[in-house]
Image: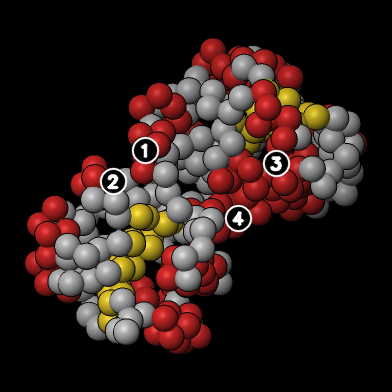
Amino acid sequence: MSKPKAVVLLTREMQDKVFSGEHLERIALVASLIPADRDEISAEWQQAAIKDADIIITGWGTEPISDAMLDAAPGLRLMCHSAGSIKHLVSETFRARGIRVTSAAPVLATGVAEFAFGLMLVSMKGVWACMAATSQGAWDREPVMGGIREPYGATVGIIAASHVGRELIRFCKTLPLETILLYDPYVDEQEAQALGVEKVSLEELMRRSDVVQLCAPNVPATHHMINAETLALLRDQAIFINTSRGALVDEAALAAELESGRILACLDVTDPEPPEAGSPLYTLPNCILTPHVAGAIKQNIRRQGESVTQQLEAFLAGKPMPCEVPLDKLDILA
């Protein structure tokens, strides 16, 4: 019996970043692998490359999978995406034809959550203010004590039980926190209890949290969900961390709140990205700005290759794929 045909729709450079030699060898054991062999990708090439494929491996740089491409591969059964969001690649035709899709979003989320968790810990300890003081030759922690809120007995609020949000919940449960609050309209009380969190409204989360972690997807319903009204609810010395997308935050309102000196913000994402020249986000001492480094940019990219390999192996063995995307819920996914 011949092996199913698996085509990599990536450039050689991207394939080499995402997949190790071992990953490709494992895939080749269970499928007839057509590896990447190009330095550039075009829709025309992709339509020819996909011909008669049973499985396609996509990722950063892959062109949207059009219906014409799908017509060239009538036997296509699986798309393994080696990056996060698939919304720009797939159409309703995938669901109609029963083509299953996996994404590396869960493993990408681990790296983002690690970064967000680290930001939270150093921010709670007042590290940024300490660094500013010691860089000026001061060795006195008393002036920064007011901004320190250590984890013991603290309340952390997580906005959205996304892949990143769930990883953060797992990390936060290792700390001696008072409670973990969750705002997510798609999580019911039973699931919240299973996650070990307290389900609350967005307003209550903003009022009660010492740290707010924004982990929601960028969809129309979340645009500027963090605005002047919600920011005003934050307690003095609260910490706001955004590693999701900048469009979720009204940045003019955030800048105004930061200028009051009441809160600290850590922003790895902005809208636009980067911020416009002259934006106060660059210079406000209580705004920690990083250039979108939370996601996989170096070693963590290999996690994505491992994920794709595992999903493909599971599919061909007739086993469940933990990273399968529920295509009926595509409208609420990032």
* x and y percentages locating residue 102 in the rendered image: 42, 57
Q: Please give left or right for residue 64 compared with residue 319 in the image.
A: left
The quarter of the picture where the C terminus appears is top left
Residue pointed to by mark 4: 110
Real-space Cα separation, disc 4 to disc 3, in angstroms: 11 Å
- Looking at the rendered structure, the number of numbered marks drawn on it comes to 4
What residue type is disc 3 on?
A: Ile
Compared with 307, 22 (above or below) is below
Could you give the CA–CA distance between mark 4 and mark 2, rounded to whole angstroms? 28 Å
- Compared across the picture, whether 38 is left or right of 55 comes to left
Q: Secondary structure at mark 4?
A: helix
Q: First in sequence: mark 3 or mark 1?
A: 3
* SS type, badge 2: helix
Amino acid type at mark 1:
Asp
| Depth check, front residue: 39 or 6 | 6
Residue that badge 3 annotates: 169
Q: Nearer the viewer, mark 1 or mark 4?
A: 1
Residue 68: percent from the left, percent from the top? 10, 57
The residue mark sitting in front, 3 or 2, is 2
Q: Tell me if residue 261 can be seen.
A: no
For image coordinates 76% across by 34% down, the residue present is: 196
Q: Are marks 4 and 3 in contact (CB under 8 Å)?
A: no
Dot 3 or dot 2: first in sequence order is 2
User: Which residue reaches farthest front?
Assistant: 1
Separation of marks 3 and 2 at Cα, in angstroms? 31 Å
- Tell me the residue at 36%/27% (across/down): 220
Question: Could you say which disc has been placed on residue 328 in the image?
Answer: 1
- The Cα–Cα distance between marks 1 and 4, rounded to whole angstroms, is 24 Å
Task: Compare marks 4 and 3 and give the one earlier in the sequence.
Answer: 4
Residue occupied by mark 2: 95
